[in-house]
Amino acid sequence: MKVEVLTPSCNLDTVRDGRGGIFTWVPPEPLLEFNLIYMHPGKVRGLHYHPHFVEYLLFVEGNGVLVTKDDHEDPNCPEEFIHVSKGICTRTPIGVMHTVYSITPLTFIAMLTKPWDECDPPIVQVAPLPHTLEGKQP
């Protein structure tokens, strides 16, 4: 299974009453940790996977691209992408390689099904990627 975009539910009365709206996502597994992540424009959060937890990302500001690839060593293996912006929530299963590229300042909340510090290792970097879209190190 690859990264999926989750669709929220919405009680439309929360929109019709004129105060705004409430959108709800109900994950199929318990969330045990969450993190607030800020990315600067043009930065990359390297190609990696998590061997011990499912990762949910809820984007709250900005624009970017979440990219997955089945085989990082095969240059002919196609990449898949999801354009991310405010209100997009994704679910990345255990072991799925992914990376996030920021286009504008990007803020998102990462929610994990197992605490980071209880994982050994919590992250496996698959291939070194530049930290910027231009390929320059910071």
Image (cartoon, rainbow, N blue to C red):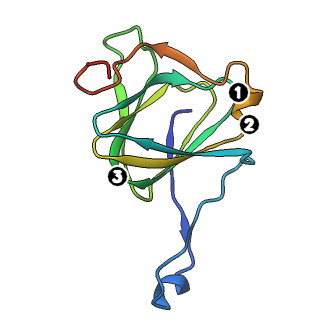
Furthest-bottom residue in view? 17
Q: Secondary structure at mark 1?
A: loop
Residue at the disc numbered 1 = 52
Residue at 60% of width from left, 24% of height from top? 95
Residue at the disc numbered 3 = 62
- Which mark identifies residue 88? none
Mark 1 → mark 2, Cα distance in angstroms: 7 Å
Residue at 30% of width from left, 26% of height from top? 132
Q: Relative to 39, is 96 above or below?
A: above
- Which mark identifies residue 114? 2
CB under 8 Å between discs 1 and 2: yes
Task: Give residue 128's position: percent from left, percent from top.
Answer: 41, 13
Mark 3 → mark 2, Cα distance in angstroms: 27 Å
Task: Give residue 13's position: percent from left, percent from top.
Answer: 54, 86
Task: Give residue 61's position: percent from left, percent from top.
Answer: 39, 55
What amino acid is at disc 1? His
* Residue 60: quadrant of the picture: bottom left
CB under 8 Å between discs 3 and 2: no
Q: Give the mark, 3 or 2, whose residue is nearer the N terminus.
A: 3
Q: Give the mark, 1 or 3, whose residue is nearer the N terminus.
A: 1
Mark 2, other Cα within 10 Å: few <14 / some 14–19 / many ≥20: some
Q: Relative to 32, is 67 above or below?
A: above
* Residue 69: quadrant of the picture: top left
